[in-house]
Image (cartoon, rainbow, N blue to C red):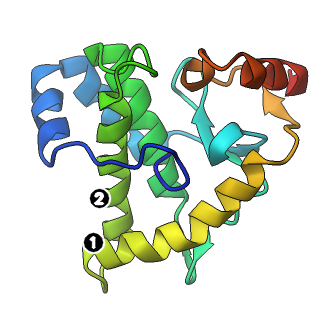
Amino acid sequence: MSAGDVDDRLGPKGELERLRAAHVQLDTYLSYLESRPVLRAGVPFGAGISTDGQTVYIDSRLDTVVNGTDVSLALATHEQVEFGLRQFAGIGEDYETDPRGHRLANRAEYEAVATLFPELDANDAWDVYDEHIDPQVRKIEGEALTNVPYNLATYPYEHDEAMMTKIKAAQHE
């Protein structure tokens, strides 16, 4: 996710729409953003997605209500866009060396946040969101992992041996 992530840069505006037009499977996958289940579990960095891209996980310690609005949809949007770009457009396949997928997911998350707070301009909405989510994610990063889903996609952590060891030790069926 972008809030709390080391790389919080946004992908280019309009790029995701261009990619959706060029990749039918990506467009189809992203057409179902709001219908996939969002479950609470133990997740590094606050949010993640299942290996098949059909379930979003948000860390159970993360308070997702910002000024009375549940922002789970913004977190879920980021995870699904990132997964979809990787799976159906070959973007971000190596998370460490190709940050485009993550940055385009940041852009989608940013735009989702703007829709959740229509009374604010997009930058102000993002600031309110980030000020609420970021400190929590930073705190979670320092805590032990527990209750990690067995099917959590681990591609963001493939190059971090210590994190992969923590995830495997905390996974459950």
Mark 1 or mark 2: whose residue is earlier in sequence = 2
Q: Residues within 10 Å of mark 1 (few under 14, many from 20)?
A: some
Indicate which disc residue 122 carries: 1
Up-down: is 13 above or below 69?
Answer: above
Asked if the residue at tag 2 contacts the one at tag 1, i.e. Cβ–Cβ closer than 8 Å, the answer is yes
140 over 70 or under it: above or below: above
Residue type, numbered disc 1:
Ala
Left or right: 107 as drawn, with respect to 32: left
Relative to 143, is 99 on the left or the right?
left
Instruction: Write down the residue under mark 2.
Output: 111
Look at the picture and state if 21 lies above or below 23.
below
Residue 41: tell me if it is visible: yes
Residue 107 picture location, percent across and down: 29, 49
Disc 1 on helix, strand or loop?
helix
Q: Where, quadrant-wise, is the C terminus in this rendering?
A: top right
Q: Position of residue 114 (x, y in %)?
A: 32, 68
Name the residue located 30 percent from the left edge and 13 percent from the top edge.
Answer: 90
**Amino acid beneath label 2:** Glu
**Res 150 seen here:** no
Quarter of the image for residue 57 reads top right
- The residue nearer to you, when weighing 68 against 170, is 170
Query: Residue at 59% across / 41% down in the picture?
Result: 37
Q: Is residue 27 left or right of residue 147?
A: left
Q: Residue at x 55, y 57 (%)?
A: 72
Alpha-carbon neighbours of circle 2 within 10 Å: few (<14), some, or many (≥20)?
some
The total number of labels drawn is 2
